[in-house]
Amino acid sequence: MRYRDIRRYLKPYSIVANRTTTINHAFAACIAPFDTYDEERVREVVATLGQDPDTNLVCSYCGAEAETWDHVHATVKDKKFSGFGHRIGNLLPCCKTCNSKKGIKGWRIFLSSLPMPDPLRKERESRIDTYLNRYCCMDAIPEHLPEYQELQELRRKVLELFHKADELASVVRSKV
Ligand SMILES: [Zn+2]
């Protein structure tokens, strides 16, 4: 870290700037369909990825020790549910570094940005391709449901309240 990094804290904290993405994500994630745990299927998926289900898993992108599961296709797109939920076919073993660096980038673009020998990259790419072709599917986005529209309205209201809170906080700071 460089000493100049301190600058990012020497300014007013904005709820909107720091929490909008979290809120959009939460409202998308909460309606995303999910698979129930199926031991046999998970073992099969892990084997498809060329990994041994009886040992610790490694990151599907960089090969480091896996610490989490990455939603291959992000659950959120344009602030809304993307159609890709919490499905066994949409989750890959992943290290925390890759999980946070990948962000909303496509998995293939992210994989090509990692330093590794070409043959290894091709092998990982082909394993992920096989896994996605075999297990990944897109769910319908329930835009026709009134409850879905009401949820979107709630999300807008929450963000509106964040704006209001930021304005009030600015007034409070100016009066202290
Ligand atoms: Zn990784």
Image (spheres, rainbow, N blue to C red):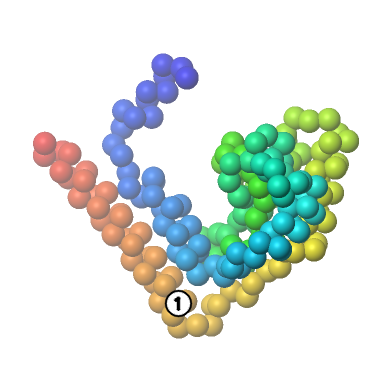
> Does residue 10 lie above or below 83 as drawn?
above
Quarter of the image with the C terminus is top left
Q: Position of residue 154 (x, y in %)?
A: 36, 69
Q: Is residue 110 visible?
A: no
Give the camera-side residue of 21 and 86. Answer: 86
Query: Most extreme residue toward the front, as rendered?
Result: 54
- The answer to which of 107 and 64 lies nearer the viewer is 64
Mark 1 nearby-residue class (10 Å; few <14, some 14–19, many ≥20): few
Residue 52: percent from left, percent from top: 75, 46
Residue 164 position (above or below residue 57): below
Q: Residue at x 44, y 80 (%)?
A: 147
Q: Residue furthest top?
A: 3
Q: Depth check: give the residue in front, 147 or 98.
A: 98
Q: In the rendered image, which quarter is residue 146 located in?
A: bottom left
User: Up-down: is 175 above or below 134?
Assistant: above
Q: Is mark 1 within 8 Å of ligand 1?
A: no
Seen in the image, is 126 located left or right of residue 63?
A: right
Residue at 17% of width from left, 45% of height from top? 171
Task: Determine which residue is flagged by label 1.
Answer: 149
Whether residue 38 is visible, yes or no, is yes
Residue 80, image x, y percentages? 52, 64
Task: Return the residue found at the far left.
Answer: 175
Instruction: Look at label 1 and name its amino acid.
Output: Gln
Residue at x 64% of width, y 65% of height: 38
